[in-house]
């Protein structure tokens, strides 16, 4: 009797079917275990297949994508990337599919998410390929997201605090010196003038002695707001230079124009009242101001410009205070 040639083939097919079923079952168990773990991790995690279709996504990642978990399963994750990044990741997946046995990683990389609610979110994205040796079938891809919008907002606030005088809200001295150097170079390169005004509150020690340091601080805050209000352009900068001294950077302004700004500051401060602080209704304060201007190579450095403005300020105080002096 001739052996049935189909019997080995049937057995082989049956064995393959059992193995496939076992692999799928094992993979499902792994996915369920991973899904449970991902749901309690404080990271935004999602898993996609080699076609980019979302198979698992935890609540935080769903929040990042801007849709409910159920609505995201089965969707291609590429569509949630801004078009400038989408093609890059589609190309990445095509290449990864050619090497399904390798564990590959990409990122973290800054991307822009196009959320389901039509808003945008900046995020750091890391993508890792789980090879077939781990999944048992086709490769899977794990994505991890970090919200950069929040981090950038916090970082911007830290930078603002680091460059701001806590009492007056103006730029601090470090910010002043850094901005002056930058503006100085820009004006030199474009053959433009740059002016600096140094301002000192007259007899401020007597003010503190007579009315107290709390009122002294409030007085400085009023003066700071007045100076800031008098700035002539967006790239002008008002800063607290130290104690009762202030500084104003005026890019592109010659000495004549800088003097007009200084006169406006002087007039506005001379009319300030302090009755809200419990001081006499007729009480007033004044300031002395020194101006220095760089144009045509008069000063070699920004520090030399500060020294010239400081010399002019000293002269204004020596001449009787409540006046403006222009350095030469």
Image (cartoon, rainbow, N blue to C red):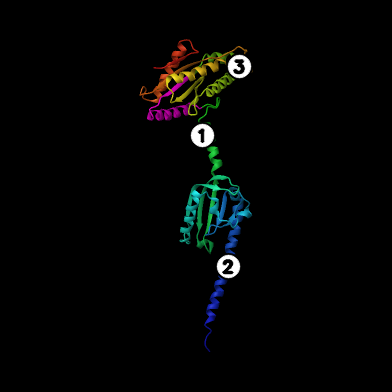
**Which residue bears the numbered disc 1?**
159
**Which residue bears the numbered disc 3?**
274
Label 3: which secondary element: loop
Query: Are the residues at dot 2 and dot 3 in contact (C-beta closer than 8 Å)?
Result: no
Q: Is residue 14 above or below residue 215?
A: below
Q: Within 10 Å of the Cα at label 3, are there few (<14), some (14-19), or many (20+) other Cα atoms?
A: some
Q: Within 10 Å of the Cα at label 2, are there few (<14), some (14-19), or many (20+) other Cα atoms?
A: few
Mark 1 vs 2, N-terminal side: 2
* Secondary structure predominantly adopted by residues drawn in magenta: helix
> Which residue is located at x 51 percent, y 53 percent?
127
Residue 8: say if magenta.
no
Q: Position of residue 2 (x, y in %)?
A: 52, 87
Label 2: which secondary element: helix
Instruction: Measure how far apart labels 3 and 1 are at the Cα level.
Output: 33 Å
**Which residue bears the numbered disc 2?**
22
Q: Position of residue 271 (x, y in %)?
A: 57, 15
Residue 101: give its label.
none
Q: Is residue 265 above or below residue 54?
A: above
Mark 2 vs 3, N-terminal side: 2
Q: Range of the magenta residues?
A: 171-198
Horizontal side of 131 relative to 212 (left or right) equals left
Residue 173: say if magenta.
yes
């Amino acid at each position: 009797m001739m052996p049935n040639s189909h019997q080995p083939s049937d057995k082989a097919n049956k064995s393959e079917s059992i193995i496939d079923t076992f692999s799928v079952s094992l993979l499902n168990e792994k996915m369920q275990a991973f899904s449970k773990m991902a749901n309690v991790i404080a990271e935004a995690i999602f898993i996609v297949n080699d076609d980019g279709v979302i198979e698992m996504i935890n609540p935080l990642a769903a929040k990042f994508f801007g849709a409910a978990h159920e609505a995201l399963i089965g969707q291609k994750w590429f569509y949630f990337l801004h078009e400038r990044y989408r093609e890059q990741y589609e190309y990445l997946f095509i290449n990864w599919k050619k090497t399904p046995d390798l564990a590959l990683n990409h990122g973290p990389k800054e991307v822009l998410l196009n959320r389901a609610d039509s808003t945008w979110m900046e995020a750091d994205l890391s993508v890792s390929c789980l090879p077939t040796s781990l999944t048992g079938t086709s490769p899977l891809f794990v994505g991890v997201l970090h919200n950069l919008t929040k981090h950038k907002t916090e970082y911007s606030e830290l930078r603002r605090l680091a460059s701001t005088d806590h009492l007056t809200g103006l730029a601090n001295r470090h910010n002043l010196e850094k901005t002056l150097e930058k503006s100085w170079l820009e004006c030199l390169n474009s053959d433009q003038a740059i002016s600096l005004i140094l301002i000192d509150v007259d007899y401020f020690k007597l003010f503190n002695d007579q009315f107290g340091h709390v009122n002294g601080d409030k007085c400085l805050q009023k003066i700071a707001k007045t100076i800031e209000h008098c700035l002539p352009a967006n790239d002008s900068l008002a800063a607290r230079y130290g104690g009762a001294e202030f500084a104003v950077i005026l890019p592109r302004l010659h000495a004549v124009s800088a003097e007009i700004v200084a006169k406006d500051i002087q007039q506005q401060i001379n009319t300030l009242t302090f009755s809200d602080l419990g001081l006499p209704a007729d009480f007033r304060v004044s300031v002395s101001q020194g101006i220095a201007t760089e144009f045509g190579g008069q000063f070699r450095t920004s520090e030399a410009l500060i020294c010239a403005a400081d010399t002019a300020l000293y002269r204004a105080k020596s001449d009787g205070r409540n006046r403006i002096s222009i350095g030469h």
